[in-house]
Amino acid sequence: MSPPSRRELLRASGVGLAALAGCTARDDSLDDAATRTTTRRTETTAQRTSETTTTTEQTTTAAEASECAPKSLPETGWPLPDRDPANTNYAPSATGPVEKPSARWQRTAEPPETDAYVEAGFTDPAVTSDRLFVGKRLLPGAESPMPEGNALHAYDRASGERVWTYPLGDEAPRALAVTGDAVHVATWSRLSAVGRTDGTRRWTFDPEEGVEAVTPTDERIYVTAGSGSVTALRSDGTAEWTASAGERLSARPAVYDGSVFVGTADGTLTALRASDGRERWSATLAGGDSDSDRLVTDVAVTDCRILAIASDDVVALDPDGLVRWRATGGYGTVSTDGASVYAGTDDGHLRTFSAAGGAVEWETFLGDRNHRRVDGIWTDPVVADGTVYVSARPDSLYSFEARTGRENWKLTFDSLAHSGKPVVADDDLFVSAGNVLAAFA
């Protein structure tokens, strides 16, 4: 089984440290606070450093934007970790809260009763039209074994009342996704399919090398293992095919237009045929002296561009695997609406590029110039109808205008807990922060 990714280790360090806005009651509101490098592209040697939002001329036409917009998006909700199988983090029909929101309901993850030190926290949620699904995971102390009490919870989306619980024992949930009538929850060693309405087990898949990531679609469920294999499962959990794609897979697979795109720890991006796992093409995106220097950690796909984070760079390829442009600068996340690419850095910059050519459209600095701590973009940017949402370390959630980068509002968590990915559905916004799950409106 492969070790946790850098992002997962960072997320785990914030689990259970504190609640939202310093509140343990469900109706407490959030406090506000004042808002608080360089990118080099292959097309130019010009370097830019910015602490405030700046804009440049738009380089993508309306026709190009329409042609390149992600296809096969869910009709509603946020059912997968990056919303759709192509990992775009794009919800064009959702608005989210236009004005600065307040918490509509909150739920707290409680640790089990034990003499050992244990913290509890929530995964990022998956949202459908009527329900919200979230994993409760436990984080024991360094000398303590993993206790029983990990679980998958289903909540009523409107009221926040718990509908059912599926116990996971001593297996902590890593991620979950909803397709059809099943919720798929992944732990380090197992993938379980659970009935969406009643929370009963349908089937489990236990690969010998463990589960690295999962991307379900209507046709198949694609599971990557720590050894570098990709397995396509049928809806009943039986394997249809297995393929090897590298020494270790380091990014959630993206599935788009008949291909499965997987990134490896040695800096390679490979496109497999979704029907049988045969390789279409493979491209080397990164080099370096260690695995941490070569990792491909994020992949998102549209009709016009395949986007990846490789060696902390944003790399844009055409559908045939040819690199079109690269942006360097410590990036860890990438999202797209087809026309623009939204990426966050480890030191707190959020930048938007033209998907066509890589020109910077706007950028803003969300970090803190205090060198005693490291601030950065904590999650993938989430792109809704004209709005971008992003969480930034250590304690903030932002809303920006997608076209200009103008800040709409900022929420500050009165704690050390890192907020998870803001999940937007219709005009609602859901986010986990440490041991608190909250719905905003």
Image: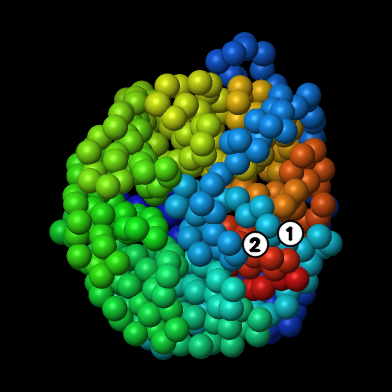
Quadrant position of the C terminus in the picture: bottom right
Residue 373 visible somewhere in the drawing = no
Who's the residue at 59% across and 66% down the image? 77
Lateral position of residue 72 relative to residue 267, left or right:
right
Please, what is the three-letter code of the amino acid marked with disc 1?
A: Thr
Q: Give the percent coordinates (x, y) of residue 414.
A: 71, 66
In the image, residue 362 above or below residue 219 = above
Q: Residue furthest top?
A: 45
Please, what is the three-letter code of the amino acid marked with disc 2?
A: Val
Based on the displayed image, in which of its 4 quarters is residue 148 positioned?
bottom left
Give the residue at mark 1: 95
Q: Give the percent coordinates (x, y) of residue 262.
A: 34, 41
Neighbourhood count class around disc 2 (C-alpha, 10 Å): few under 14, some 14–19, many 20 upward:
many
Based on the displayed image, in which of its 4 quarters is residue 373 positioned?
top right
Q: Give how far apart the Cα atoms at labels 1 and 2 are.
A: 8 Å
In the image, residue 138 above or below residue 327 = below
Circles 1, 2 touching at the beta carbon (< 8 Å): yes
Quadrant position of the N terminus in the picture: bottom left
In front of the other: 384 or 395: 384
Who's the residue at 53% across and 32% down the image? 304
Return the mark for residue 122.
Answer: none
Return the mark for residue 424.
Answer: 2
